[in-house]
Image (cartoon, rainbow, N blue to C red):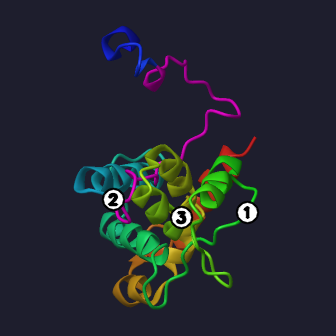
Amino acid sequence: MQEALGSHRRHEAIFTKMQFAPGYEFNVFDLQVGCEYPLPLERAFLQNFLALITLPPDQSAPFEGMSQMIGIVIDEAYRLCTDVPGASPKRYRRDVEPLVDAAIEKYKIEMNPDDPHWRDVVTALCKAGEYRLAEIAQRHAVPVLQDLIGASRTDQVKDMFGKLRIEVTAEQASDLFERYIYDVIRNSRP
């Protein structure tokens, strides 16, 4: 691949063996640079991924209504990361990404001093043509697994699924979803 790119673009391709170790983590909720919501195929992947991790033990079909709720929770998680009323976009913090901090200074990017957001950093870096740095900033602007808990507690999810009870466990669907997500988070920490 590096040879096909030529000498001036060879740095764009690397080989690395994936490992289950620190430094190889990735966020399945990450998006393409500049996007605030997943594209249809990305959303379908997330829905399938979350359906798999919320499957009942020793079953191959999700709990009744869980797939529909997962779709709404995904939408809510991304909505909460945008700058719309009632949302809480991820706040930019200096010294998290030194290369991004340097680019903000280099391009004299003005941030809201009271409430700077990673999403604003992404937009500004894209305008400056710094797409690689925008990609780094984007990772901090999107939801992470823990954000699904808050998304499952929003009024929209509660209004649509608040009365849905899982017959097998006698739990509300949103409570069961939270329990499964907490379990995945707990088991994924070293």
Marks 1 and 2: which is nearer the front? 1
Could you give the CA–CA distance between mark 1 and mark 2, rounded to whole angstroms?
26 Å
State which quarter of the image contains the N terminus: top left
Residue marked by disc 2: 38
Q: Quadrant of the C terminus?
A: top right
In the rendered image, residue 3, in percent from the top left (x then y), is placed at 36, 8
Magenta span: helix, strand or loop, mainly? loop
Real-space Cα separation, disc 2 to disc 3, in angstroms? 19 Å
The kind of residue tagged 1 is Arg
Q: Amino acid at mark 3?
A: Val
**104 and 31: which one is in front?**
104
Tell me where the magenta segment starts and ends, as one range: 11-37
Residue 148 appears anywhere in the view: no
Q: Which residue is mark 3?
A: 121
Give the residue at mark 1.
Answer: 94
How many C-alpha atoms fall within 10 Å of the one at disc 1: few (<14), some, or many (≥20)?
few
| Mark closer to the chain start, 3 or 1 | 1
Residue 36 magenta-highlighted: yes
Q: Assess disc 2: are there few (<14), some (14-19) or many (≥20) residues with their C-alpha within 10 Å of its C-alpha.
A: some
Looking at the image, residue 172 lies above or below residue 56: below
Nearer-N-terminus badge (1/2): 2
Task: Give the secondary structure at mark 3.
Answer: helix
Which SS class for mark 2? loop
| Residue 12 image point, x, y percent | 44, 26
Q: In what element is the residue under mark 1? A: loop
- Asked whether 103 or 188 is in front, the reply is 103
Residue at 55% from the left image edge and 42% from the top image edge: 26
The reply to whether callout 2 and callout 3 are in contact (CB within 8 Å) is no
141, above or below 170, in the image: above
